[in-house]
Image (cartoon, rainbow, N blue to C red):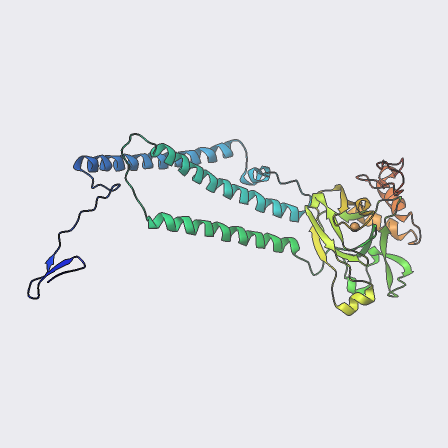
Amino acid sequence: MQGSTGGCVEMGAHSATVAAPRVAHPIPYAPGPSDSLRDDLIVSERRFLVRRKRWARGGSAALILAALTLALSGCSVSGAQKDLRFGWPTGVTKEATRMRVLWTWSGVAALFLGVIVWGLIFWCCIRYRKRSDELPRQTKYNFLVEMVCVIVPFIVIIGLFWRTVVVEDDVDHLSKDPDVLVTVDAFKWNWQFEYDHYKTTPKTGTDVAAVYPGVKDPTTGGPLNLSTVGSDDEVPVLVIPVGETVQVIEHSEDVIHSFWVPEFLFKRDVIPYGTDAQQKASGLADNRFEFTATTTGSFVGRCAELCGTYHSQMNFEVRVVSADKYLAYMKALAAISPDNPARQSIALGQVFGAKNAYATTTYPFNTDRSSRKASTQAAGS
Ligand SMILES: [Cu+2]
């Protein structure tokens, strides 16, 4: 009786189990290296190690040369990172600068990794280019390389996330006692700017720099805050002091608008919560944000939310001025009755001259829907 089990041959009931001869399966792509091939590989490895040392020395020399060039050309690291914008627009607030710094260093980090990856790709192309028809040494499962390829991207992601959260928190930060507190009231289709407070405590109601003296607010019965409002004929201008923290309360009663100043590199929606009574009942609070302007000048602002028929005409201007000019403007406004619809241009003219009595970065649009023509700037506006 003869049977076969696995790789053994059983010869009868008393026969010994004899191992069957192993069949040598050809391994087409992994031949054992001959002595000469092994020698070639050893020589090749040595050459590689020598080259690696040379490259390391060359890389160090390049880094030192770059640092020396930077130092000798009078560039500072802060100057270089200021110029490395990678397309980021120039902002005029501290918050815009913080965002730009994040963008710059993210770009530098991406370039650094990019150069390493490109270098490795080109190195592989040159180092392992085809030299003959001989099959090169086949390798697999390099644990170290695979771990590096997993861990490094994770470190990059964690770094980017961490810095983004830190900068986002900075941009969204609200001071307990900002220098200037302004309520931006958006409505179909214009803006009202109410100056609630300037460097005094708003809760006490004694902020004389931002109220009409002797005029009571009909709603609260307290002092009436200084305010200006835009119209079809006049673009609203928000005047703020440079280098001081400005907190904006965004209020709307009709639809969603969005306060956007392109040079601030920032916009935020103005969410409507109905009338004051409805909002109070809902317990929902108006959006707030804060900024500190770093450059004086006039900057156009726009509504960035499609809010209705004349949405595109909701332009305004933010005028960043010195603290002295700001206080002078507050005083000029306080001296004009809140019932005077021309109070903004009168006060602006008194402080900044007749040429700057109106917005200088934009102009009122023609609201006649039958005109069928693009709006042009009217004389004197
Ligand atoms: Cu709007």
Residue that lies at the very extreme toward the front in this rendered image: 1
Determine which quarter of the picture holds residue 356. top right
Number of numbered markers: 0
Q: Residue furthest top?
A: 131
Is the residue 373 above or below the residue 236 in the image?
Answer: above
Q: Is residue 157 left or right of residue 311?
A: left
**Residue 26 vs residue 95, the one in the foreground:** 26
Residue shown at 23%/44% (left/top)? 27
Residue occupying the point 53% across, 31% down: 73
Viewer-proximal residue among 131 and 85: 131
Residue 55 at x, y percent in the picture? 36, 35
Horizontal side of 191 relative to 109 (left or right) equals right
- Quarter of the image for the N terminus: give it: bottom left
Residue 331 appears at what percent x and percent y? 86, 51
Q: Quadrant of the C terminus?
A: top right
Q: Position of residue 76 (x, y in %)?
A: 54, 38
Q: Relative to 180, does residue 297 appear above or below in the rendering?
A: above
Q: Position of residue 139 (x, y in %)?
A: 30, 44
Residue nearer the viewer, 208 or 272: 272
